Amino acid sequence: MIDNIDFVVTWVDGSDKNWLSKKNKYYSSKISKMNSDKAYRDWKTFKYWFRGVATYAPWVHKIYLVTDNQIPDWLNIDNSQIEVIDHKDYLPHDALPVFNTNAITVNMHKIPNLSEKFVYFNDDMYLINPVRPKDFFLNDLPRDMAVFQPINPEEYGTAHFQVNNMAIINKYFSKKTILKQSKIFSWKYGIQNIRSCLFMNNNFNPGFFETHLPESFLKTTFNEVWDREKALLNKTMYSRFRSDTDTSEWLFRDWQLAQGKFKPRNNCKFGKLTSLSNNNDKIFNLMASDNLKVLCINDSFDLDNEDQIMQDFISEFEKKFPKKSKFEI
């Protein structure tokens, strides 16, 4: 019998008029560009996320879809594996409405009935080949890759969160402690071990290599960090839009890595981060190949013909997943 492993996925339809009206009541030009329309854009491909799960991870226990009073019109909410979770179901009333993914994800452990072992997906992280429970958890521990890498100040607008997260990690874990109890070097990481070698002389923890893939978590990790850093995490929870003072769910991943409470996996062979462009042939070839299990297809700012790209995007997914899944009406 497979232990319960849940999937959590966050989704928003940034074109929904009711949602936009609510957002615009609070939005101002002073808010950081990390809250641009790109952060909320819906490419109409979310159904293929569910088709990927149905095809390649039929063993999943529950899927928790976290939304803000939005349900895709094609979703079969009568399917017993799906739980639609509204923000108000686990966030305090005075923190709502919220348009900050960080506020939503640092509180994931509060989702009612969520299993101790769960995997968090962005809605742009697609399963493209079969996955097994042991791809995400092994001997009740998350699968991951602990590789040192300095934080890139321009990385996807997330550098502030990563710096804030790592400040907390350095507060509780010395470099010596992490090297002693964690799994910084593993043959499973392959060539990625070179990254850690380059930063062995630092007296502090520079950051962990972030591959932008689904993240395996233990709820107890969230509880432990919240117990120690409630004030800082509350500040994120009450940040209506993304802010330079935010932490993120990567903090809990970093904590697990620092503790050594994970089983090594080569994330670079497990999945890949890509970004849409004006020529997406490489992405479409990866989608059709057997080389990876997960593909993160990130949005981009500079696209010449968004409508055509969306049509091409959907067309490729239709080739990959031509049939409706049990999660669709």
Image (cartoon, rainbow, N blue to C red):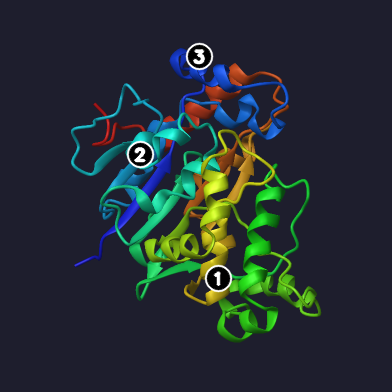
> Which of the 4 quarters of the picture holds residue 172?
bottom right
User: In the drawing, what numbered circle is on residue 257?
Assistant: 1
In this picture, residue 244 sits left or right of residue 131: right
Q: Residue at x 62, y 47 (%)?
A: 246
Looking at the image, is mark 1 or mark 3 nearer the viewer? 3
The disc, 2 or 3, on the residue closer to the chain's N-terminal end is 3
Closer-to-camera residue (145/252) = 252
Distance of label 2 from label 1 (alpha carbons): 26 Å
Looking at the image, is mark 2 or mark 3 nearer the viewer? 3
The residue indicated by pointer 3 is 21
Quarter of the image where the N terminus is located = bottom left
- Residue 215, percent from left and from top: 48, 56
Q: Residue at x 73, y 74 (%)?
A: 194
Name the kind of residue labelled 1 in the image: Leu
Quarter of the image where the C terminus is located = top left
Label 3 residue SS: helix
Distance of label 1 from label 3 (alpha carbons): 40 Å
The residue indicated by pointer 2 is 65
- Residue 137 visible? The answer is yes
Closer-to-camera residue (156/203) = 203
Name the kind of residue labelled 3 in the image: Ser
